[in-house]
Image (tube, helix red, strand yellow):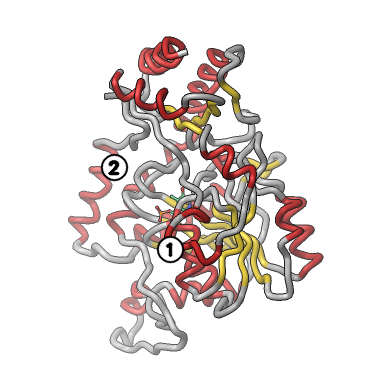
Amino acid sequence: MIPNSRPSIGDDELNEVKKVFSSGWLGMGSFVFDFENAVKDYLRAKYVIAVNTGTSALHIALDALGLGDDDEVIVPSLTFAGTIQAIIACGARPIFCDVEENTLNIDINDVRSKITAKTKVIMPVHYGGLACDMDGLLKTAEEFNLRIVEDAAHAFGSNYKGRKIGSFGDITCFSFDPIKNITCGEGGAVVLSDDKLGERIIQKRILGIDKDTWHRYKNEHSWYYEVVVPGLRYHMSNINAAIGLIQLKKIDKFIEKKRKLCRLYDQEFKNKEEITLLDKDYGQIAPFNYVIKVKKGRDQLMEHLKNNAISAGIHYIPNHQQPLFKPFYRRLPVTESIFGQILTLPLYFDMQDSDLFKVVEAVKKFF
Ligand SMILES: *Cc1c(COP(=O)(O)O)cnc(C)c1O
């Protein structure tokens, strides 16, 4: 079976994890701080706060902003359920908005039409690694006094107009789950430059305690701590950070290879009238997945691929159609129409060209 995605991990990661085992310190410690510093250098960011999942990163960011009852967050419906659960966990309301047909990124005109007096945050998702219209979103946020929490789960390593996602903007959240651009096994990070908010998130990620465990243990009064704000237990472990440290060293290699595979797919499909490609400038992005739009017979194509030992996927089932989020339903014409067309083909670093051509041949044969 050709998988839809899979992490590229091996002895390098395992050897780094062994160092954690030998140290006897499995929780948050020097590996986590080294990982944060390495990500900080890579992104040229001020604060990089490592947490245990991407969903935690989104939740803790919204929580630190003081989001609560009745506050509205404008968010695309076409995203992973974690994005929406982070909003719900704060007791806030997701206001679902539509996406652009050719990029699957948030439609800024629809965002602007949904801003009310209760709107506090816009949550764009950089779909597939392609950056949203950040200039337009940041300008809109300034105009209406809103915050922007970017769900950059797909976009670690991507650029927007030559600048890395996470190196500018307001609050950027990454995921390092098993299939993301780099993985920690599980992990995430909140990236920002706002000092007050940064310090608050650092406290919140480990139960509202005033100092990171590691620093506490280095103090003379190593037993002393104070609980100062409501907090969560969202910090990253040394085990996960060790995996991330090695993965980060490989990111350029990961990006180059996946760009090459995407361009190969594009080349093969660009003249097929049954398929519409998304607008993507691979020179700018770290591709997370490879999505095509199939005008007719998407489900049959998926079944055909499965019968040919190829795993295709659908990213995502629109959240406004999910049972839990029904109270927030509103009609989203583009999202609803493209949901029947999108298909995610296999893409991962260790994919061979021969695997890709197997996929291409199977798709062509179907039509
Ligand atoms: C993966 C993902 C998340 C959440 O990250 P986890 O680390 O899996 O919690 C959020 N949003 C999007 C778009 C994602 O793909």
Quickly name the residue at label 1: 324
**Image: 284 above or below 32:** above
Residue at point 40%, 88% (across, down): 227
Q: Quadrant of the N terminus?
A: top left
Quickly name the residue at label 2: 13
Quick one: 44 or 174, which is closer to the camera?
Answer: 174
Badge nearest the viewer, 2 or 1 = 1
Q: Amino acid at mark 1?
A: Leu
**Spot occupied by residue 364 in the image (x, y as percentages of width and height):** 46, 12
Say left or right for 315 vs 143: left
SS of the residue at dot 2? helix
**Image: 117 above or below 293:** below
Say left or right for 173 vs 12: right
**Spot occupied by residue 17 in the image (x, y as percentages of width and height):** 25, 49
**Spot occupied by residue 131 in the image (x, y as percentages of width and height):** 63, 43
Q: Amino acid at mark 2?
A: Glu
SS of the residue at dot 1? helix
**Spot occupied by residue 312 in the image (x, y as percentages of width and height):** 39, 30
Quick one: 35 or 74, which is closer to the camera?
Answer: 74
Residue at point 64%, 49% (across, down): 98
Q: Is mark 2 within 8 Å of ligand 1?
A: no
Residue at the extreme right of the image, as rendered? 143
Residue at point 31%, 61% (across, down): 237
The span from disc 2 to disc 1 (Cα, nearest Å) is: 38 Å
Circle 2 crowding by C-alpha within 10 Å: few under 14, some 14–19, many from 20? some
For marks 2 and 1 on the same chain, the one whose residue lies earlier in the sequence: 2
